[in-house]
Image (cartoon, helix red, strand yellow):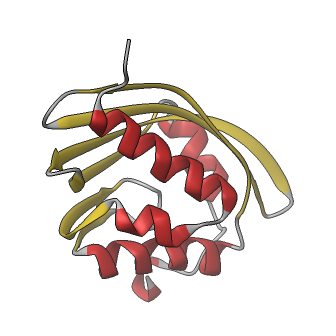
Amino acid sequence: MNEHPNAARIRSAYEAVARGDMATFADALDDQIVWHESMPGFEGDYRGRDEALALLGRVFEQTGMELNDLAIDHILADDSLAMVLLETTVTLGGRRQTSQYVDVYRMRDGKATEHWHLPLDQRAEEMLFAGSHLSDTET
């Protein structure tokens, strides 16, 4: 069975992130994407590809977080949505943690137009990020 084109597109984008290839990841995002972020201290809606990518850069810069591993468990997709169940291992503040997430994308013409980032364990996410970045007034 062939993978749906939206699943293949998102898979390729996540594989690019794992390789450190943010240009390929960026290419999967629509210019006008709305990025709904739930990461503690960075919660909010970010509009447009440039703002979404700037957010991701700020997360790593302000927290000092290092991405050690990114593994896709499963991708479900149809003509308008793609959902990724993934596991990441990060180092943050000298602590290494593995977490699971569901990322949901609204898709149009092979591009992500909207994104939601949902940790499966919100409490563990909050504990990981507690005290790791600048105050909310600086984000």
Residue at the extreme bottom of the image, as rendered: 138
- Across and down, in percent, residue 110 comes to 22, 50
Q: Residue at x 59, y 66 (%)?
A: 21
Q: Nearer the viewer, residue 103 or 17?
A: 17
Horizontal arrangement in the rendering, residue 101 relative to residue 108 (left or right): right
- In the rendered view, tell whether residue 17 sits above or below residue 53: above
Q: Is residue 6 left or right of residue 10?
A: left
Of the 4 image quadrants, the one containing the C terminus is bottom left
- In percent of width and height, residue 45 lies at 23, 66
Image: 116 above or below 98: below
Residue 69 in the image: above or below residue 99: below
Give the quarter of the figure containing the N terminus. Answer: top left
Q: Position of residue 57 (x, y in %)?
A: 53, 77
**Residue at 19%, 27% in the rendered image:** 78
The residue most toward the right is: 94
- Give the residue at the far front of this rendering: 2
Residue in the image at 71% along x and 37% along y: 98
Viewer-nearest residue: 134 or 84: 84
Left or right of residue 113, residue 84 in this image: right
**Across the whole image, how many numbered discs are drawn on residues?**
0
Residue 133 in the image, given as x and y percentages of width and height = 61, 74
Q: Is residue 11 above or below residue 132?
A: above
